[in-house]
Image: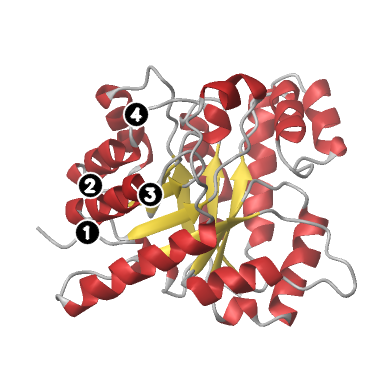
Amino acid sequence: MPARKTFQQALRSKEFVLTAQLQLNEDTGRRGVIRQVQCLSGAVDAIAIPANPHGVVHMAGLAAASLLIANDIDPVLHVASRDRNRIALRSELLGAAAIGVTSLVVQRGDRLSTEYRQSAWKGKKVGSVKLLGVARQLSNYQAQHNEPELFLGTLATVIEPGDDWQPKVLLKKADAGAQFVQTKICLDMAKLRRYMAALVGARLTHRCQFVVSVPVLPSADAARWLNENLRSEAIPESVVTRLDAARSPEQLGIEIAAEFLRELQDIPGVGGANLVTPGEIETISAVINAAGSQGRRPRQ
């Protein structure tokens, strides 16, 4: 059997990379994960595994990663330090390497709602920069023992950069070992272009590959929820208005994401897209099909 193509290999090629985010809830089990793999396997280069976003409890990322690997899909495992101590985090990194995970997104984790904050374990916090350093040590150890090195990533929020803005936090993360950056979801093309231009100007795109998370919206209510629960408004009001007026909001959400995906590939510094949906997982494949050959152009 030929070796499984990894996310790292795809992102370091000249083609635009496509990944999708696995949908995990408390009731998502083995069958649910495999069904998503079967739906997405022919359309994407890898599948990202979230780390309990917004405090939503789901199966352990390592378990989901093992299911993906067993079904010949490369996982991009998200590891959050939000409510875990150093022993648990080191243990997860070691476990990830042992089962064949080669790509990690290291993050602090979403701010929890009051409901979840009261029940979460409170320990000494480990920041994403420190955790990147720990992961880089493990990656170096892997290399010394002829094992695959870890491809390390981090998260970033697309913001409106000022005239003198510098990506100081991302530069620190790059220094700590980040090799790629996955943005949080964004459908504001004008803001994204200005943000990426600032990163190119800071020469950060020479050090890290950038993957933009694109939401596939099933309704205007889903768009409003995302704007209310993310740090920056990721969905322009014009998009919300269009979804409100649409006869078929889900179909319009697919068309909007496909158009965004095509435009995304003209932005210098962007190496790929990560498709995310709060709706049906099949809509991700529908977006890729709608984008057609324009969804796989050589990157800028």
Do the CB atoms of the residues marked 3 and 4 lie less than 8 Å apart?
no
Do the CB atoms of the residues marked 2 and 1 lie less than 8 Å apart?
yes
The residue at the point 37 percent across, 70 percent down is 136
Mark 4 — residue? 59
Q: Quadrant of the C terminus?
A: bottom right
- Label 1: state its secondary structure: loop
Rendering coords of residue 211 (x, y %): 56, 60
Q: Is residue 143 above or below residue 296?
A: below
Relative placement, left or right, of 206 versus 76 is right
Q: Nearer the viewer, residue 296 or 36?
A: 36
- Label 3: state its secondary structure: strand
Rendering coords of residue 22 (x, y %): 42, 37
Mark 2 — residue? 69
Task: Tell me if mark 3 has few (under 14), some (14-19) or many (20+) residues whose alpha carbon lies within 10 angstroms of its own.
Answer: many
Relative placement, left or right, of 167 versus 6 is right
Mark 3 — residue? 77
